[in-house]
Structures are given as structure tokens and as C-alpha cells.
Image: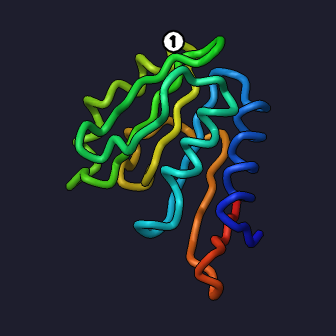
């Protein structure tokens, strides 16, 4: 589906309202297509107490939401899948958290099974993004 920036945010907030822990959501797409924007909206929908920021360098950010821990994992900087081994996915799942993973394909078999996987891409209209599940 084609979405404007405001529609993408509304979609993410609605998704956040609907998620029940534990859940693992994958977000794929080229740089700049809106993965982190979508994560921010999902976190707002979950009632996160802090604004989500890109964990590109830290790789993992943790947010407390109204009733569930939320982890935002960015695998972009992984050079090889084995580097994902120490990201703590098992601990996140034991916590019954919502886990939002950007670039899950870079974590290979170390990534937990995804409950949903969204792919964002550029649209011919620069103000829109294409969102596929």
C-alpha cells in the first residue's frame, strides 16, 4: 500500500495498539524509507514513555511502555549474522517483550522468528512510501 508520512505514522500507532506481547516485528527496506519512523509510531501506539530513536550504533534500545517492555534492534551495522548472537534476543523473548527489528535479514538464523514482517520502499511520489507485508 502507498502511504504518506502521516498515514505511515497512523498505521504504526494502530499496529502498536493491536500488538500483544510477546511479538517480533521485522522491518526491512532501503536506508531512509521510514523503518525508524514506523518504529517510533508503533512505540507511541504501545504507550512508550520515551521517544524511540535509531539504535544504529548502539544496536539495541529498550523502552518501557504502558504494560510491556519494547526492544528496538537495528541490525544494519552487522557485518555478519554471527554478530547478532550477542544481541540478547532470547532474553527479550523471555521477558515477553515486543521486539522491533530493523534489517532482520542481516541477523540470519540468530533473529527470532518474525510474527510479522513489513517491507518499506520508495514510491514514485517522493512524499509516499510503499508498505508491504
Q: Quadrant of residue 128?
A: bottom right
Name of the residue lying farthest toward the bottom:
124
Q: Who's the residue at 66% across and 45% down the image? A: 116
Q: Secondary structure at mark 1?
A: loop
Q: Tell me the quadrant of the picture where the N terminus can be found.
A: bottom right
What residue is rendered at 51% in x and 59% in y? 28
Give the residue pinned by disc 1.
95
Say whether residue 83 is left or right of residue 116: left
Q: Return the x and y of residue 61 as percentages of the image width and height.
A: 37, 30
For the rendered model, the colour scheme is rainbow
113 on left or right of 73: right
The structure residue drawn at horizontal position 69% and vertical position 57%, both measured from the top left corner, is: 8
- Indicate the position of residue 80 as horizontal and vertical percent values: 23, 53
Dot 1: within a 10 Å radius of its alpha carbon, few (fewer than 14), some, or many (20 or more) residues? Answer: some
Residue 109 position, x and y percent, is 40, 44
Q: Quadrant of the C terminus?
A: bottom right
Residue 74's quadrant in the figure?
top left
**On the picture, is 72 further left or further right than 34?**
left
**Is residue 98 shown above or below 68?**
below
Tell me which residue sits at (48%, 50%) in the image.
Answer: 36
Residue 92 locus on image (x, y percent) = 46, 20
Asked whether 5 or 77 is in front, the reply is 5
Q: Nearer the viewer, residue 108 or 41?
A: 41
Give the answer, above or below, for where 2 lies relative to 43.
Answer: below
Q: Across the whole image, how many numbered discs are drawn on residues?
A: 1
> Viewer-proximal residue, 126 or 130?
126
Amino acid at each position: 500500500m502507498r502511504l504518506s508520512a502521516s498515514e505511515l505514522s497512523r498505521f504504526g500507532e494502530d499496529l502498536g495498539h493491536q500488538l500483544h506481547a510477546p511479538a517480533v516485528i521485522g522491518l526491512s527496506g532501503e536506508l531512509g524509507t521510514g523503518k525508524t519512523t514506523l518504529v517510533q509510531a508503533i512505540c507511541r501506539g504501545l504507550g512508550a514513555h520515551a521517544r524511540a530513536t535509531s539504535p544504529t550504533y548502539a544496536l539495541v534500545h529498550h523502552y518501557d511502555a504502558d504494560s510491556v517492555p519494547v526492544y528496538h534492534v537495528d541490525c544494519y551495522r552487522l557485518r555478519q549474522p554471527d554478530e547478532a548472537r550477542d544481541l540478547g534476543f532470547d532474553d527479550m523473548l523471555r521477558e515477553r517483550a515486543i521486539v522491533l527489528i530493523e534489517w532482520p535479514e542481516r541477523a540470519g538464523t540468530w533473529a527470532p522468528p518474525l510474527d510479522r514482517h513489513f517491507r518499506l520502499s520508495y514510491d514514485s511520489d517522493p512524499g509516499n512510501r510503499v508498505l508491504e507485508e
